[in-house]
Image: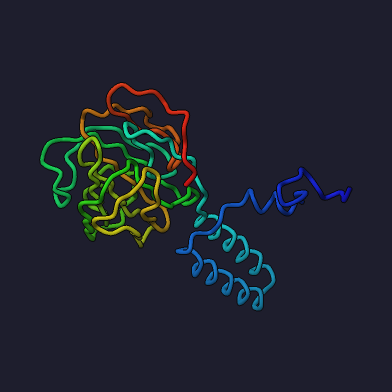
Amino acid sequence: MWPFRTRATKRGPMTIIDSIRHSMAPIHKEGHRFVAIFLVATLILGWIAQPLFWIGLIATLWCAYFFRDPDRVVPQDDNLVISPADGRVSAISEEIPPAEMGLGAEPMLRICVFMNVFDCHVNRAPMAGRITGIHYRPGKFLNAELDKASEDNERNGLVIETAHGSIGVVQIAGLVARRIVCFSQNGDVLDAGERFGLIRFGSRLDVYLPTTATPRVAVGQMATAGETVLAGFGGFDLPTVGRKI
């Protein structure tokens, strides 16, 4: 047998190259032009001086890694709130949602997930439902870990009508981020874990939930978009059924 063959598949024996290819996440289309820009800059730097080529190549690989878009296995349960972002749970508290979202003046359960520049930045819907409002507000670019970033920073908020009432999902730009991207439109119906946007480079996602929701994570815990259960409604068990998205 060829020494670089591993296990067999339906299409024939799998090579080591096949294994590497299947273990690498694809690059989201939003990142293609950035990777191309980094690559062209790398070639120019390499023409100027060889050591600069290697620096540029490392930066290009990081850019491709930043825009990775892996599939996730999303728990299937309408009572669960799934993390909309990869990153660290930075705050859990009851806060009044941004006024422009129209979610009322009463505090809601807010769970914040901070994304650093090495986290996957594709954002996913925390629950299944219909988008009833999209509200963009320009602002500053403070460190997204700061609590006041929720009020002062540039942000884009989605209101989603779910089986448990309206919830809010807010994309917040960070210190380095300068571009919030939202793929969805008002009226779209989303599945839990479905991609709805991304933020370029380092940022935060806030989820606003009715106070009947119970947190299932702790501050400092690492969350995986589309897979980690942030909170739940009523009596529920973690599901054994997932859907790959």
List the single residue furthest toward the right. Answer: 1
Q: What colour scheme governs how the chains and residues are painted in the rendered image of this protein?
A: rainbow
Q: Quadrant of residue 105?
A: top left
Q: Quadrant of residue 201?
A: bottom left
Q: Is residue 36 left or right of residue 187?
A: right
Residue at 21 percent of width and 56 percent of height: 135
Task: Measuring from the top left, give residue 6's x and y in whole percent.
Answer: 78, 45
Q: Considering depth in this image, is 213 or 143 the residue closer to the camera?
A: 213
Task: Measuring from the top left, give residue 155's x and y in whole percent.
Answer: 27, 55
List the single residue furthest toward the front. Answer: 10
Q: Is residue 144 left or right of residue 21?
A: left
List the single residue furthest toward the left. Answer: 105
Residue at 72 percent of width and 46 percent of height: 9
Q: Is residue 125 left or right of residue 130?
A: right
Task: Measuring from the top left, give residue 63's x and y in whole percent.
Answer: 53, 60
Q: Is residue 185 above or below residue 228?
A: below
Q: Is residue 92 above or below residue 114?
A: above
Residue at 47 percent of width and 52 percent of height: 117
